Image: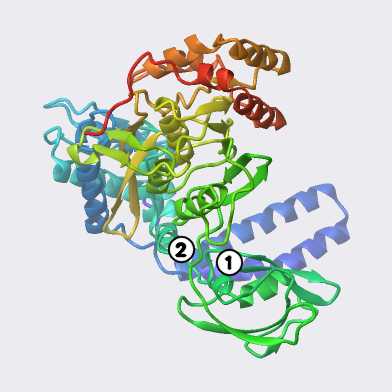
Amino acid sequence: MRIGRPGPAVGRAARRLASSRRAIWSRTRRRGGRAGRRIALCLLLTGLLVAAAARTGRGEPAPALDQALAASVIETALTVLQPRTLEPHTVQQLTLWGLNGLTAIDPDLTVQGDGAAGTPIRLSTPRGVLFERLPPAANDAAGWARLAVGMAAAAWTGSPAIRSAGQQAVIQSFFDELFNHLDPYSRYVAPAPAETERTARTGGTAEAGIGVVRQGRSIVVSAVNTNGPAWAAGVSVGMRLLSIDGQAVRGQDPDAVAAALQGEPGSTVVLVLAAPGHPPARIPIVRAAVPPETVFAFSNGNIVVIRITGFSADTAQEMSQFLEQAMGRGEGTKAAAPLHGLIVDLRGNRGGFLQQAVTAVALVLDHGVAVTAKGRDSQANHVWAVQGGDLTEGVPIVVLVDGRTASAAEIMAAALADHRRAVVVGSATLGKGLVQFIAQLPDGGELFVTWSRVLAPLGWPLQGLGVIPQVCTSLGQARLDQQLQDLAVGVFDEREAVVQSRAARSPLPVARILELRAACPAAIGTDADLDAARALLDTPGAYDAALVPLAAEPVGVP
């Protein structure tokens, strides 16, 4: 029997049942019988179901599957993916993985066929075959896209669950199932979130570059971003903010004040601020997209600690300014004593712009390859080299890392370690070392395709393995004390673990990755990291002994 939409008669029946259900319930309550209440409840539920069916019947029918758009999206995606994935896969294999997305939405659907020539691809339900077609050639992107959309159209007709999910869910499920078989970072992003991500990548909302807090009923400047327009306009911490564009802010919530400071890039906001002991001043500020401050520095005697929380558009410039000051070369600065050592703290740093990490390496490394990327597509292969720029003139460096150090931060740590420019202290890092290609699709969505692996200067992969430190702090204080004591007499306890990790090559089996990382398990950094770093810098012989062994020479500048 073919079931269609409820007609007018059903609608009238629904209205009659809906209008009478209160009377039925009332009569059964008067009777007081349990059976009567059960009957009334059944009638009530029946009435609700019929009424819902009537409402569906009166509503607009579900939109048809836009087969042309869906085919265009899938064909474009397959064309992008096939030559770029880290491991080679045919268009046929990629599509067969994706077709199981229909089953993920409706488990009654079954996809059959392996794509062998002469063997049809089928979509079936317990009630019979919905779709059947012979497969095209293994790498015919257009042909496989048509097959995928033809199958989706058949599922759309035969499966209420597919129609209820809608076209975007069908496309999303296709890519979810496909990417389940690839690396953990490749993905499809639907049009709406893709637009949000594109906006974020191009700068987002502009701001004045200040933070505010409430003290009593006053709004006070609590932070000034040195990268922002407020810093250049002379705004400083401790000033009271009296008004924004003529609107008083006294007594307001700081979050509301912060929102009022934001606006379109290039727009002007007029602030009235009062410094302690000074009359209010009217300060116009041109809003700008302000990169977050990511570099913070402090000194401990003749050792300078630079903490890098991420790699934004201005990270290398910020680091350069701190290094110039530490060396006594900054404008109006003078070093109190010769710099004895530098600690670069990358703990908790999740990465950011790769180029900024490379430029940061260039600030303390005279020359050499910082990192390479290798993939199947020739355009994915790249070498990032640095030359001529050690601002510290060879000052010993210790880099602190932990289990949260990732991506661009791992690149910096690996480059300085492999070139024997720094000793890495801490625990095994996260191990994120993949580069992605971004493609925009015809529906406005985006495809993020991992197309190359990041390799450290000595050729070992960052992905999965991470950076294994020369001095491990995650094995307990007793083990750390023993390492430092042995290094002081020239004995490098972790030598074998470091040499083996630097000799590793892609692709690494998971078991081997786990074995190498077990030498220094990932952990969250503690004060022991800083203590170990200072001990190394205070003992030149221990520092020299802890440098990466010369088991292999770093890759030179091409």
Tag shown at residue 14: 1
Is there any visible trace of residue 242 in the rendered image? yes
Residue 6: which disc?
Answer: 2
Amino acid type of the residue that numbered disc 2 sits on in the rendered structure: Pro
Q: Which residue is drawn at 79% across and 47% down?
A: 35
Q: What residue type is labelled 1?
A: Ala
Eyeballing the image, is 250 above or below 41?
Answer: below
> Helix or strand or loop: what does disc 2 sit on?
loop
Residue shown at 35% from the left, 49% from the top: 171
For label 1, count other residues whose C-alpha is less than 10 Å away and answer few (under 14), some (14-19) or many (20+).
many
Distance from disc 1 to disc 2, alpha carbons, whole Å, reads: 10 Å
The C terminus lies in quadrant: top left
Q: Residue at x 56, y 18 (%)?
A: 541
Residue 256 place in picture, x, y as percent: 69, 74
Horizontally, is 54 left or right of 451 in the view?
Answer: right
User: Front-most of 321 and 400?
Assistant: 321
Residue 222 at x, y percent in the picture: 71, 66
Q: What element carries label 1?
A: helix
Are the residues at dot 1 and dot 2 in contact (C-beta closer than 8 Å)? Answer: yes
Q: Which residue is drawn at 56% across and 64% down?
A: 226
- On the rendered structure, is 471 left or right of 155? right
Image quadrant assignment for residue 129: top left
Q: Residues within 10 Å of mark 2 (few under 14, many from 20)?
A: some
Q: Where is residue 101 in the image (x, y as percent from the top left)?
A: 37, 39
Give the x, y percent position of residue 144.
19, 41
Q: In this view, does 359 lie above or below 84?
A: below
Query: Residue extending furthest bottom?
Result: 246
Can residue 128 be seen here? no
Q: Counting residues from the N terminus, which is met first, the one under dot 1 or under dot 2?
A: 2
Q: Is residue 177 left or right of residue 212?
A: left
Q: In which quarter of the image is residue 428?
A: top right
